[in-house]
Image (cartoon, coloured by chain):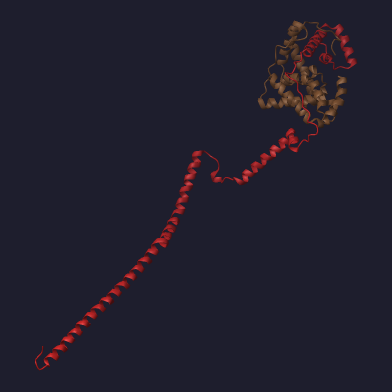
Amino acid sequence: MECTGFDWKGYALGELSAAETAEHERHARTCEHCRTELARYQATVAGLRSLPLVEPPRRIVFAPEPAGRAVSWWERMWQSGPQLGFASAAVLALAIVAHGLLARVPAKFAPGPASQIEARIHEEAQQEIARRLPQAVDAAVERRFHDEIRPAVASFKAQMLQEEKLREAGFEQKRDSELKTFQYAFTRLEQRLNYATLSSARPNGGE
Amino acid sequence: MILREADERDLVPRAQNGDVEAFNVLVSRWEKRIYNYLLRLAPDADEAFDLSQETFLKAFQNLKRLDAPERFGPWLYRIAHNEAISFLRRRRPESDPPEQSTGKTGVFGMAGIEISLAVEKALSVLTAEQRESVVLKVCEGFKFEEIASILDTPASTIKSRVYTALEAMRVVLAPVVPDGHGAPGAEG
């Protein structure tokens, strides 16, 4: 037989008012079924309350701060979970922002598989070489022409002029020499002629 | 209980003003109960002790936030509960019921040991929420409203959990509890 309107769990837990408790007790004295049900709840509660308490492995003791020692701001923060957590989060946020500003990675170099990055770098390098190579060759040729060929040509020209001068100077000298030789020969011939003329004019007929 | 609350109304304000010795007295009064409560939630005794230390450390750091010194006990259990839940979430998101310790000796000789083992077994069939609620209600003696504040759950839900847990435990304990055990007026 089930009796309704009775809270035997509440009775076993001591949650009922004095009037309710008295009413439940009156009923339990006359109803064996409810008495048995109550006994089981009471046994359950008694069993829970009888569970032995286990001693902690050691005592928990907090050491007092040394007298007169001022606690610095960082110690207070270190001991405060929320403040330390906030400070850590702030430092982390600053680091992320700084990294984002100072080490911004171009979209074309966005992280990806290593092989793709390597291929992309190779392609970029080839394009850059193709773009810069003609300019670099022209600049190198121009620089070489200015630095080496033009001075060499100028030097060659100067050398040719010098040799031309030398050649002309030699020709003049040779001509003068030949002219002097001719003049000397002419002078000698003239002297001989004069001598011969003089000799023939003598009465004895010469020498 | 009344004497302890009277003492705590004196000790808590002293501890709030930085009196570490006063806080150590509070620790010595509550550490055994907190440790045993955490034994029901943590996977093993080492974790339970670590959580106990964390609980009292958090309590010391946040003691100034406690407005009512007479509510120190429920406030402390709330910290312990939060520490245990945080630990279990970090450790295993899908929390399994912790292994119940065995080999505890009762206070009633061999019969006490048998009852203790049977009660431990009955506790192990409960859900974690039911187990915590019934431990706080029956073993720790808190009122439903106090448990509601500790677990941040409506008192009606706590009452439902405790009643469901008692029903389940009664079934498990039936073979070892003789009919007619106790009598009206023996409990409560």
Q: Is residue B25 above or below residue B115?
A: below
A189 or A34, nearer to the observer: A189
- B128, above or below A68, in the image: above
Classify residue B35 by image quadrant.
top right
Taking the spot 46% from the left edge, 54% from the top edge, the residue there is A132
Relative image position of residue B106 (x, y in whole percent): 76, 10
Q: Position of residue B85 (x, y in %)?
A: 72, 25
Q: Colour of chain A?
A: red
Could you tell whether A35 is left or right of B48 in the image?
Answer: right
Q: Is residue A100 above or below residue B165?
A: below
Number of callouts: 0
Instruction: Give the x, y percent position of residue B127.
Output: 71, 19
Residue B54 visible, this angle:
yes
Front one among A2 and A153: A153
The quadrant in which the N terminus of chain A is found is top right
Q: Nearer the viewer, residue A94 or A121?
A: A94
* Residue occupying image coordinates x 90% and y 15%: A18
Residue furthest to the right: A19
**Residue B154 in sight from this viewpoint:** no
Which residue is depicted at the point 74% across and 33% down? A79
Seen from the viewer's position, the closer of residues A26 and B32 is B32
Q: Quadrant of residue B104?
A: top right
Q: Is residue A115 left or right of residue B102?
A: left
Q: Quadrant of the C terminus of chain A?
A: bottom left
Picture coordinates of residue A196 (x, y %)?
Answer: 13, 88
Location of residue B161 by image quarter: top right
Determine the colour of chain B. brown
